Amino acid sequence: MIEIRKLNKAFGEKAVLKDISVDIKEGELFSVIGPSGIGKSTFIKCVIRLLTPDSGSIVVDGQDIASTKSEFTLARVRRSFGYLFQEGALFDSLSVFENVSFGLRYLTDIPKSEYPRIVREKLALVGLRDVERLKPAELSVGMKKRVSLARSIAAEPKYILYDEPTTGLDPVTTGMVKDLITDMRAKLGVTSVVVTHDMKLALDISSRVAMLYGGEFVEVSEPAAFRNSENKAVREFMEISHLSRDGRRHI
Ligand SMILES: Nc1ncnc2c1ncn2[C@@H]1O[C@H](COP(=O)(O)OP(=O)(O)OP(=O)(O)O)[C@@H](O)[C@H]1O
Ligand SMILES: [Mg+2]
């Protein structure tokens, strides 16, 4: 369980997250939605302390990582996380195989002889095969995204944070990634936080959706209630996403 209390993060004068409090429960698929530049990436980067919050607490399995100065504690907590960077962030000099198995080497005791099987399996889950030897430069944007996704799930972490998992993907691959995220939860009981500006995706896959606006979660509710929210920011965002209250697109 991830318990976030009064989380604040500013860049200079600009307060991006203001007193955010939320509990992300075991096995949940919690989505954070909001327009570009509102602070979605900032939020999940704070959750694994890639960014240090200005104040507040983030308690993961009983351990507050917002303020800990212990590298040991941070490393231990991070081990239970998989993280999909918005930018993909593959290591350019490493092959696909080395990228996907990277976390296995540093975060687990899984014997090396198992890596080829695991890498093959995870790549298959994102619809890729026979790409192990390629370098990131030889991959399309969508393929890079999928390799990044395979890397974030390789060690089968307890928590997975996905930053814009479907941006830049075609509809077929988007469907595949959607299934993958849902399956990780259903089959492995993974607790997931998905950050996205794709309202339809969030409404389709989440147990709860949070709307980040003006530095706050202005609405946090289950998809059915979220669709019918009277909050102005939610209504506007639904409108921009061409979604009606029943979740159907109206274009
Ligand atoms: N390291 C940083 N230094 C200064 N400002 C930053 C930094 N990271 C983010 N910001 C600012 O914080 C705000 C929120 O950025 P963030 O990347 O969290 O938005 P986002 O909701 O993820 O946007 P997008 O949907 O485009 O990915 C933006 O105004 C951004 O310019
Ligand atoms: Mg972002």
Image (cartoon, helix red, strand yellow):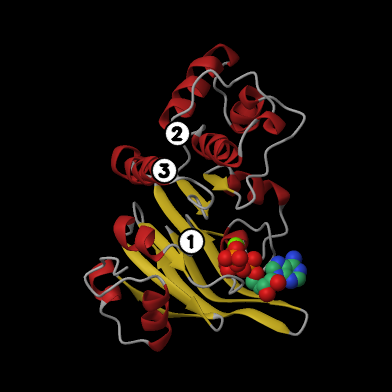
Ligand 1 quarter of the rendering: bottom right
- Quadrant for the N terminus, please: bottom left
User: Could you say where residue 192 lies in the image, as x and y percent from the top left?
Assistant: 42, 52
Q: Secondary structure at mark 2?
A: loop
The residue at 60%/41% (across/down) is: 141
Q: Is residue 109 above or below residue 237?
A: above
Q: Amino acid at mark 3?
A: Val
The residue at 32%/63% (across/down) is: 203
Q: Secondary structure at mark 3?
A: helix
* Residue at mark 1: 196
For this view, does 216 lie left or right of residue 232?
right
* Residue at mark 2: 126
- Quadrant for the C terminus, please: bottom left
Question: Answer yes or no: do the residues labelled 1 and 2 have beta carbons within 8 Å?
Answer: no
* Residue at mark 3: 177
Question: Answer yes or no: do the residues labelled 3 and 2 have beta carbons within 8 Å?
Answer: yes
Is label 1 within 8 A of ligand 1 (CB to nearest ligand atom)?
no
- Where residue 244 sits, quadrant-wise, is bottom left
- Where residue 234 sits, quadrant-wise, is bottom left
Q: Quick one: label 1, few (<14), some, or many (20+) residues within 10 Å?
A: many
CA gap between label 1 and label 2 equals 18 Å
Q: Amino acid at mark 2?
A: Val
Q: Secondary structure at mark 1?
A: strand
Residue 131 visible within the image: yes
Is label 3 within 8 A of ligand 2 (CB to nearest ligand atom)?
no
Query: Mark 2 or mark 1, which is nearer the start of the sequence?
Result: 2
The residue at 72%/50% (across/down) is: 71
Q: Looking at the picture, tell me which residue is in the foreground, 145 or 168.
A: 168
CA gap between label 3 and label 2 equals 7 Å
The residue at 30%/37% (across/down) is: 187
User: Could you say where residue 183 lies in the image, as x and y percent from the top left?
Assistant: 33, 40
